[in-house]
Amino acid sequence: MRPWLTALAILVSLATPAAGDEPGALRAAAQGFYGVYETFHPSSGIPGDADRARYRPYVSPALDALLKQAGDAEARFARANKDSPPLVEGDLFSSLFEGATGVALGACSGDDRNGQCAVNLTYADPGDKPTSWTDTVYLVNTPLGWRVDDIGFGGSWAFGNKGKLSDTLRQVAGFP
């Protein structure tokens, strides 16, 4: 085998988890994402360029592009509507407006291309009963390894994020 083909094969094998190791690789990617998330509490709205750069090692190129597009739309809206609140207020990455003060990964599953992990989240405000819920983080295996590609919101209260993160971002990015 030519040396450059051998090097390419080694790189591909390093970027792709071994068969049967998906749950561990998924868990590691999700933990990296939520490790960054926990440094932003309370988080509010769409992350700016500097904050998005901190998430970049843990999100898919598609999710990073959606965050950028939504951030650009938010900036256009703010310029056109000086006295209006932003298009997105509150925590973008969880079901609850206030965000989560506690994160615990649940079970992860997937194949060699796609996976998901349950994320058990809690918001604790001193003096109040904690609120707990489970969101789902969806991951995709990219050439750089596993990355968060979307979040499914699992909160059951009337107000809060519903559906998926990507749906919210596409709606915001569609602002003229």
Image (tube, grey):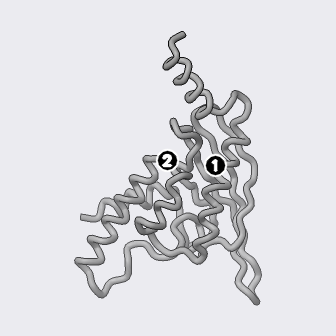
- Picture quadrant where residue 172 is located: bottom left
Q: Residue 29 — which label?
A: 1
The alpha-carbon separation of the residues under discs 2 and 1 comes to: 11 Å
Q: Is residue 139 left or right of residue 68?
A: right
| In the depicted structure, whether residue 1 falls above or below residue 109 | above
Secondary structure type for disc 2: loop
Kind of residue at disc 1: Ala
Say above or below: 132 vs 17: below
Give the mark, 2 or 1, whose residue is nearer the N terminus: 1
- Residue found at x 49% / y 47%: 60
* Residue sitting nearer the eye, 95 or 143: 143
State the image coordinates of residue 47 (x, y, percent, origin top left).
Answer: 46, 68
Is 30 on the left or on the right of 63, as rendered?
A: right
Q: Position of residue 128 (x, y in %)?
A: 74, 86
The residue furthest top is 1
In the picture as drawn, the residue positioned furthest to the bottom comes out as 127
Mark 2, residue position:
60
Q: Position of residue 74 (x, y in %)?
A: 34, 70
Q: Residue at x 65, y 33 (%)?
A: 17
Viewer-proximal residue among 31 and 110: 31
172 with respect to 13 (left or right) = left
Q: Residue at x 54, y 23 (%)?
A: 7
Q: Which quadrant of the figure contains the N terminus? A: top right
> At numbered mark 1, what does the secondary structure look like: helix, strand or loop?
helix
Q: Which mark is residue 149?
A: none
